Amino acid sequence: MNSANAQGASKPSVDYSPIRAVPAQARTAVTMAYEARNRRAWEELPGYGQIAKDDHELGAYPMFWYWRQQLQDSRLPIDYSGVQQFIKRHPNSYVAERLTADLQMASARRGDFNQVKEFGLSRLNASAPKCAYYQAQAATSVKVDKNEALKTFQANPNCWDMLRTLRNAGQIGFADLQGLMRDAVEYDNKGNARQFAGLVFDAGQMRDYDAIIANPSGWLASQSGAASSPAQAELRAIAFSRLARQDRDMGIGVLQSRGAELLTPQNLQWAYTQFGLIAVLNLEDRSDAWYRQGKAVPLSDYNAAWRVRAALRQPKIDWSWVKQTIAYMNAEQQAETAWVYWLARADEALGHKQQAQQGYQKIEHELDFYGLLAQEHLHGKIRAVKAAAPVTSSELNHIKQNMGLQRAVALFRLGWRPEAVAEWGHAIRGLNDRDLMAAAAWAEQEHIYDRVINTSSLTRNEISYAQRYLAPFEGRVGQQARSVGVDPAWVYGLIRQESRFVPVARSSVGASGLMQLMPGTARLVANKIGMSGFSPSTVNDFEVNTILGTNYLKMTMDDLAGSEVLATAGYNAGPNRAKRWRSSLSQPMEGAIFAETIPFTETRLYVKHVLSNAVWYQMHFSKGQPQSLMRRLGSISPW
């Protein structure tokens, strides 16, 4: 989604028209088409599409579903005329933009690159159609902006095809692909790493690559002397990276004894950072020494971040080295609030008071974890910026004429969330701050709480705390939290992160309800508290979910020495993992550093979001009196 147009008039992507009634017969045809789509009865859709035409909100959907299926089925020829007529009949709409992207992707897969180029670069917030466009350019001898193309890449068929076409056209080479391949190796994404390797190495080198993945130490034992080519040099670097993952105790000995013989000086430094990365992800203090061996070697953003975290985890922090590791990052990464904050902390620890103040001031207006901490360093407390004026009835009436939002609301009312969320995202693109807040206000009227939060969070200059930190069900959730002895603001911060207050939310791993409980966890807690009449089918029920969720949070906190940091981590990743992370400490650690160095990316972000959310909810519940985030984070002890 494009950033909001924060100042001046909105530049919406959709048309505006007053809300008007929809003919019942036409809407019924849409719902019948939805059922037919779910049955994969594609042949029924054109008939329903004819009847649905009078539904000015959702009447396009039967034929939208029909044409999407036609384009996605590679066995069928593309009816360009039919698809393009549909697109022309529905200008400035999500369905037209989505179908255009689908047409581009399908055309690229069939090699019809002129058709792909006809529509230009997709505005859809998706990589695949953009990759199809860049592929079409390269396939027709048009010079591609390779930096934009590589930035667009995600691991999907169209993007892999784009890379292959760019490589075959000579528009990208080894130097362009090396970083992507190394990123995949570092993430231990074997599938993606092998695909990148196939773009870089020839058939013989791929046999070496496969041997390295299977047995890096055995392959390295067959090597001697300096590498004879850049490809062999890269294979050796990858072999040491794999060795770090398979047996870092043995592998570091091989690196120390043979690294200088087998690797270029820069690859030797990079190899040491691979051992540093695996060590710090296992919360080993020795990681920092290995990172220091890497010196200023360029690293992926992921590894560069962990180089800083390894320095922060040391029993005695060398703040000069922390500052140096941040300086090694690229400029874009250094500008992230996390690293602005830790650089300011380093300056403060080193006695560079003015530089520290300037660093904190850069981010004190951010509402995130680091912005709140920066405020406390600057002012000794958290201070909210002035809240935006409430949405007026005139602003609300105006936004209700946004036809994209009308479609989205109609879809939400039918319970068709995937379609509704896509329509909503398209409809708010280009809106200014006041219109975004008005859209959020309409969502609140409709009890679409996730859209309230997500939409209002896009504003740049005007901030509605009441929308961003929405507190539906306030009395009921707060009462339940207090009844089991947990802070209601903390519970709200957790629910905001878990489900955005969508009671029917279900995660990809099976967690469900407001507090995203796994079936096994729900059953365990229900048994422990003696809940009568519990069954898995009731987990999404408001009362059942909040009773079980708050009790589980309390149990987790009690099991983890009353620490909200550890309990939040345990709620997300499991209490046993939180215990293992705590047991890795040799002495008490500042809560902010512990949170920063949680090895699971999802859990690390989760903890920071939940606890910063809790600060804002505490401010809401106490009528403007914020609680200290530093105090909430506290200190984490290994004992």
Image (tube, rainbow, N blue to C red):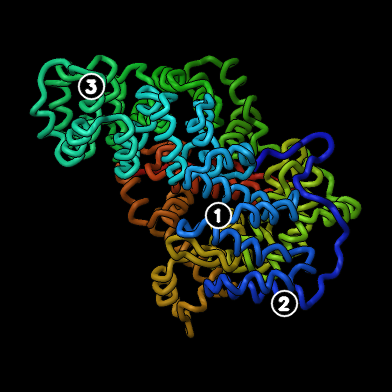
Q: In this view, does 287 lie to the left or right of 444?
A: left
256 versus 55 height, above or below: above
> Which image quarter: residue 502?
bottom right
Q: Dot 3: few (<14), some (14–19), or many (≥20) neighbours within 10 Å?
A: some
Q: Can the viewer see residue 585 in this picture?
A: no
- From mark 1 to mark 3, how far is it between C-alphas? 46 Å
For image coordinates 60% across by 50% down, the residue present is 614
Residue ranking furthest to the right: 394
* Residue ID for mark 3: 233
Q: Is residue 83 above or below residue 544?
A: above
Q: Distance between the residues labelled 3 and 2?
A: 65 Å
The residue that label 2 is drawn on is 28
Q: Give amino acid for label 1.
A: Ile
- Quadrant assignment for the N terminus: top right
Q: Where is residue 253 in the image (x, y as percent from the top left)?
A: 13, 27
* Upstream in sequence: badge 1 or badge 3: 1
Residue type (three-letter) at the residue carrying disc 2: Thr
Q: Percent position (x, y) of residue 575? A: 37, 57
Q: Which residue is drawn at 49% across and 36% down?
A: 135
Near-viewer residue (351 or 427): 427
The structure residue drawn at horizontal position 58% and vertical position 74%, both measured from the top left corner, is 36
Report the Cα–Cα distance between label 1 and label 2. 29 Å
Tell me the amino acid under the disc marked 3. Answer: Ala
Q: Where is residue 320 in the image (x, y as percent from the top left)?
A: 42, 17
Name the mark nearer the viewer: 1 or 2: 1
Q: How many labels does the image show?
A: 3
For residue 78, the mark is: 1
Q: Where is residue 220 in the image (x, y as percent from the top left)?
A: 13, 29
From the viewer's perspective, is residue 535 above or below residue 172?
A: below
Label 2 environment density (alpha carbons within 10 Å; few <14, some 14–19, many ≥20): some
The residue closer to the viewer here, 226 or 207, is 207
